[in-house]
Each structure stands twice: as C-alpha cells, then as structure tokens.
Amino acid sequence: MTREHRQMITQQVLYGMVLPAAIYAVASHFVSTLLALVIASMLPVTDVVKAKIKGQKASAASLGFLGGAVVTSALGLLSSSPLFILLKAPVMSAAVGLGIAGSAAVGRPVLRTLAVAFAAGDAKDEAKALWSSKPWEHLFAALSVVWGVLFLVLAVVQTLAVLSFSPGITLVVLPPLQFVALGLGGAVSLLLVHRAGGLGAMFSFTSKVETVAA
C-alpha cells in the first residue's frame, strides 16, 4: 500500500468517523439538533471543494458521500426528523455488504479488484493472474462472504443504535462500532489468508517481477 493510499484511508476515517461528531457537538450549542446534524453531515463537501481548488476531479467516493448527505439532509429537513440523517450510516453499511456479497455471487469479487488496485503496486497484471487461480479465487470468495455478512450485521447494530440513543450519543457510538467491525474483518481476513498459504505465497508474484526487472 502506497503512502497516498494510506493518506486517503486516514482521511476517510477522519472525515467519516471523527469530525462529524466533533462538528455536531459544537454546532448543537448554536442551532437546533436537526440543523446541527445537517451541518455535520455536509463534511464531504470539503473534499469536492479541495478537488476544484486543485483543478482536479472529485473522486466518485466523495461525490457519492456528498450526494447521500444532500438527500438525507433534505429528507430530514422536510420531515423535521433527524432519523433520515442518522440512518444514512446503516443504509450505507447495508449497501456495501450487499455489494460485496453480490459481486462474489456473480464471480467478480470486488475485494479482489480492490486488492489489485491498492496492494499490487506495479505488478497488477501478475497479481490479477495469481489471485484468479486456486486457492486464491476461493479465498476472495470466502472474504467476500465474511465482509458482506459483517457489513450487514453492522447495519443492523447501527440501526439499533440510531433508534436507541439521542443524536449526539449516536454520532459518538457509530464510529467505534465501525472500528470494531473493521478490526474483526481484518482479523478473520488474516486467518483465512494464513490458511490459504500465507501472505508470502499470496504476494509471491512480487519476487517474480523483481527477478524479471533484474
């Protein structure tokens, strides 16, 4: 994983999990609960603005998060209910879970595509060839099931949190739930990789690329 990829992940964690709760905590002292939630949910607009300032195109993820925030905020304001805004997190978790599981069901696991893009470096063709063969094909199918189910369970837990707690507490509770889910998924993923042959075998294509280059 490159430095740029790590920075992107860190930024997504910060923007998606930490800052919204902090912004809500400050804004709620000056405006209503509903407006404070709208302000906190509009954080993705900063990614779009920064991209425009740099003369770049905003990423699909940034535009997707912003679109979701706009829709849920509009529904919340029209209905005068914060539930539409707070339920955005479980809805997105459910969508991700269904997407991951669905991609495996059609034989094109999105996790393998992401692994090639983020972990293969300059050896993407070699990685795709290796990870499309056994036992790695079965590994990515298993990983898709694990992560798909995990995100669906997370969506259920997040929904229960939204319905059980006040908006302020919900914004504080949701990030740890996401961290726990990601931690569990990472641990199970490493276990499955170990059973399939280990990280060394999984990334054996890198040594072949180095040999050819030499």
Image: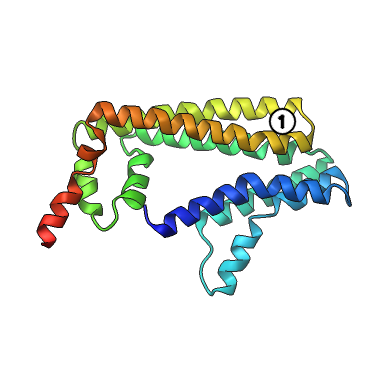
Left/right placement of residue 93 relative to residue 3 reads right
Can residue 105 be seen at all in this image of the molecule?
Answer: no
Left/right placement of residue 94 relative to residue 82 reads left
x%, y% of residue 49? 63, 67
Task: Count how many numbered circles sit on residues in the image.
Answer: 1
Callout 1 crowding tier (Cα within 10 Å): few <14, some 14–19, many ≥20: many
Q: Residue at x 18, y 44 (%)?
A: 204
Q: Residue at x 55, y 51 (%)?
A: 12
Q: Is residue 139 above or below residue 126?
A: above
How are the colours assigned in the image? rainbow
x%, y% of residue 84? 73, 38
Query: What residue is pinned by disc 1?
Result: 162
x%, y% of residue 195? 26, 26
x%, y% of residue 169? 75, 34
The residue nearer to you, when weighing 95 against 126, is 126
The C terminus, quarter of image: bottom left
The secondary element bearing badge 1 is classed as helix
Q: Amino acid at mark 1?
A: Val
Image quarter of residue 139 = top left
Q: Residue at x 16, y 55 (%)?
A: 209
Q: Is residue 181 above or below residue 214?
A: above
Can residue 178 be seen at all in this image of the molecule?
Answer: yes
Q: Is residue 172 above or below residue 206?
A: above
Left/right placement of residue 111 relative to residue 55 reads left
